[in-house]
Amino acid sequence: MHFNSSSASAPPVIELAMIQECFADVDGCRMRYLAGGEGMPLVLIHGLLGYSFSWRFNLEVLARHARVYAIDLPGSGFSCRNPALTGDLASLAQYVLAFMQAVGAKSAVLLGSSHGGGAALLAAAMAKEWNISIEAMILASPVNPWSKQGIPLTSILGSSLGALIFRSMAWSLAPLHGRILMRMYGDPRRIAPGTVSGYNQPLKIPGTLDALLRRIRNWKSDLAKIEEALPRFLTFQSCCSGATGMAPCISLRHSSSWSGFITLNCK
C-alpha cells in the first residue's frame, strides 16, 4: 500500500491493488470515487473537510468483504464545485442516493463519519422514495442535534459578516486545516506521511470555500432535520468509547458524542 503526492490540481496517488479511481455523472455533477471488491455495496461517506482520501487505510480491508464505494461528495475532494449546490445535508443525501442509482447499487450499507454520518442518516430516511434499500448504517461520531460542538463557530461563519471575514482569510484555509489535523493527534509524529498534504490538496480547488460556507450556513437547520429523521430508525446499538473501553449502550438524547450501528426498519 503506497500513497504518493501529486500536483495541487490532481488527487493524491493511492496505490491499492484492489481499488480503482472512478468518476460518475450524477445529476450534472462529476463525482469522483474509489471502488473495489465484491459483495454487498458499502458506501463510505466522509466528513466536512474530508473526501475519499479519509478511508485510504480502510479500503483494501473492507474490499475483501464488500463492494466498497468511497465517494467525494459534491463540493468536496475532487468532485464538482457547482455554485448551484445548496450544500445542505438533505441535498447531499440525495446525491448519495443518486450516486447509488448511477452505479447500480439497489441496496447498500452506509458508513458515515462526522458530517457524513448526518448525510447517511438522511439518505436512509429518503431511500424508500428512491426505491433503494439501506440494509444498515455504521456511524462514526456523526453530527447530531444534542452536540453543542461547533455551534458557536458555525453561527459566526454562517453570518454575512463571518463569511466575509472568512473569505478574506481564504489563503489560510489549507495551512489552518493542516494545523487542526496535527492537533487531533496526541503525538503529531504519528501522523502518516502525506496525510496533511493529502487533505489540503482539494482545498486549493476554486469553489471549495464557497461550498464549505454553504454547508456551514445550513448547519443549524441540518441538525433539526437529523432529529426529525431519527425516530424512523427502530433499532439502534450505541456504544461510547472512553478511557476504560466501550461503555454500555445509552440513550441518544443524553449523549453529545456517539457512534453506533443501526439496522434499518423505516416506518
Image (spheres, helix red, strand yellow):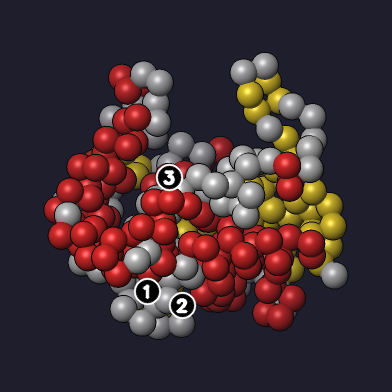
Name the amino acid, label 2: Val
For the residues labelled 2 and 3, say whether their Cβ atoms are less than 8 Å apart: no
Name the amino acid, label 3: Ser
Q: Is residue 168 visible?
A: yes
Question: Which residue is at the front of the view, 33 or 226?
Answer: 226
Which type of secondary structure does the marked residue at label 1 adopt?
A: strand
For the residues labelled 1 and 2, say whether their Cβ atoms are less than 8 Å apart: yes
- Identified at 27% across, 55% down, the residue is 202
Q: Which residue is mark 1?
A: 30
Q: Residue 54: give its label.
A: 3
Q: CA distance from mark 3 to mark 1?
A: 19 Å
Q: Is residue 126 above or below residue 47?
A: below
Q: Which residue is mark 2?
A: 26
Q: Quadrant of residue 158?
A: bottom left
Which type of secondary structure does the marked residue at label 2 adopt?
A: strand
Name the amino acid, label 1: Arg
Which type of secondary structure does the marked residue at label 3 adopt?
A: helix
Question: Which residue is at the front of the view, 243 or 41?
Answer: 243
Q: Quadrant of residue 241?
A: top right
Horizontal side, residue 136 vs residue 215: left or right: right
Q: Earlier in the sequence, mark 2 or mark 3?
A: 2
Q: CA distance from mark 1 to mark 2?
A: 6 Å
Q: CA distance from mark 2 to mark 3?
A: 21 Å
Q: Earlier in the sequence, mark 3 or mark 1?
A: 1
- Please rate how many residues cluster around mark 1, counting C-alpha atoms within 10 Å: few if below 14, some from 14 to 19, many from 20: some
- Please rate how many residues cluster around mark 2, counting C-alpha atoms within 10 Å: few if below 14, some from 14 to 19, many from 20: many
Horizontal side, residue 213 vs residue 256: left or right: left
